[in-house]
Amino acid sequence: MTSTGIDDISLYTSSFYLDMHTLSEKRKTEYSKYTEGIGIERISIPAPDEDIITLAANAALPVVERCDKTKIGTLLFATESGVDQSKSAAVFVHRLLGLPSTCRTVELKQACYSSTAAVQAACALVARNPKKTVLVITSDVAHYPLESPGEATQGCGAVAMLITENPRILEIQPESGCCSADTWDFWRPNYSNYPLYDGKFSMINYVKTCKGAWKELSETRGLAFDQVDWFCYHLPFSTMGLKAHLKLAREAGSQKNSVELENQLSPIIHYCKVIGNCYSASLYFALCSLLDNAPERLENKLVALFAYGSGCSGEFYTGTFQPGYKKYIRTDKNKKLIKNRKEIDFETYLKFHKAADPIGESGDFTTPELTDGAFRFCGTKDHCRIYEPCSANVQ
Ligand code: CAA
């Protein structure tokens, strides 16, 4: 069988962040609730000229610059914060990146799970025709009402991955475990700017789905929990991953103690802690965090990845890090990008928050130039969204 998986991976987030000190003061909430209770210190907030398209194009640009783009046969765009009900987010990015007209483009949705559906579909497409590669982009803006319990778990970002045969970073094994059920834990009706959710139930459902998906994976593969070197979880906030990991470990008969289990997760939560929730991209930010912050070289190590999308669909799958993978990752660039974001004050946060409402004014508008990214959202004209490169920001 053709070996398939992640040949290249690149992340991007907004140029701006809100510090949890600011939110804790304004919401009269203890800072430690944010940093220890939910495990978030900063959240990336999109400027009015940033959205899922600009985040996605910025994440994918370094991947496209490093590969033969004439070989990209499909662009799969995973998101739950789509900007149009018909036109897929993929076609906007297709133009911005100058991809061939022969490239298939589509958008996928199943809450935060869709990115993993895209990765699996990409592996299947490459296995069928290894001459073509697949660009998977997962991009989201986690946007909650002001003063709601979800406000501290906002964030935004995108991860782009090139899926090929004989991948240079992570080979993905074909067997996986899935778990789906019709639940109302988190959803966003078409008429609403914000998701509706039952926070506590969503956490219970996440853990239940995680156990169900692990059961199928471990039974199919004959895989024991302690045979896995590293775990990556979908992280709506960092303590969610830890809660699930501890519960799953006990159920799966792990011999590791709580400290060992916590250590097993510590490299994956760095980016979530300072970026926040990126919905469908969160699992792949956890993977980038592991690649960039692991205390050991990961060559030939086995990682298990758990994707969860409310509503609900979950999947556990595994991959093996490839010899020489470090040559192809962008650790310094990623850390610099995250560190160089600008802090915004509370008033600016309120303006950015309002601008991110997906159902806004129906008339045309223009946005101020704020992003440091290579692409920006300029506004709308005749109900069409306008995106352009920012030549001043291209490095
Ligand atoms: N110091 C340290 N810890 C503190 C603290 C303090 N001063 N004050 C409170 N805490 C702890 C609490 O004990 C609690 O910990 P436990 O869960 O271990 O008991 C934690 O901080 C959170 O406190 P609350 O439960 O009181 O917080 P909350 O009512 O404000 O809600 C939340 C938290 C449910 C996560 C809420 O932010 C929410 O609803 N978020 C959106 C839904 C969500 O993210 N669900 C996750 C699963 S669904 C999913 O994964 C899909 C997705 O991306 C959305």
Image (cartoon, grey):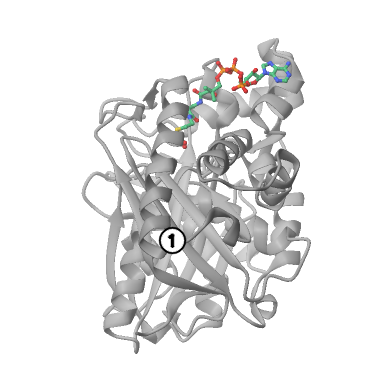
Tell which quarter ligand 1 is in.
top right
Residue 76 coordinates in the image, percent (x, y): 34, 63
Residue at 68% x, 40% y is: 273
Residue 42, above or below 319: above
Q: Which residue is mark 1?
A: 137
Instruction: Using the image as rendered, state which of residue 288 and residue 1 is in the foreground.
Output: 1
Instruction: Using the image as rendered, state which of residue 126 and residue 232 is in the foreground.
Output: 232
- The answer to which quarter of the image holds residue 368 is top right
- Secondary structure under the numbered disc 1 in the rendered image: strand
Which quadrant would the C terminus be assigned to in this image?
A: bottom right
Q: Given the image, on which type of amino acid does mark 1 rest? A: Ile
Residue at 52% x, 41% y is: 248
Residue at 58% x, 61% y is: 227
Please indicate, yes or no, whether residue 378 appears anywhere in the rendered image. no
Question: Which residue reaches farthest top?
Answer: 28
Residue 310 coordinates in the image, percent (x, y): 36, 36
Label 1 packing within 10 angstroms: few (<14), some (14-19), many (20+): many
Which quadrant would the N terminus be assigned to in this image?
A: bottom left
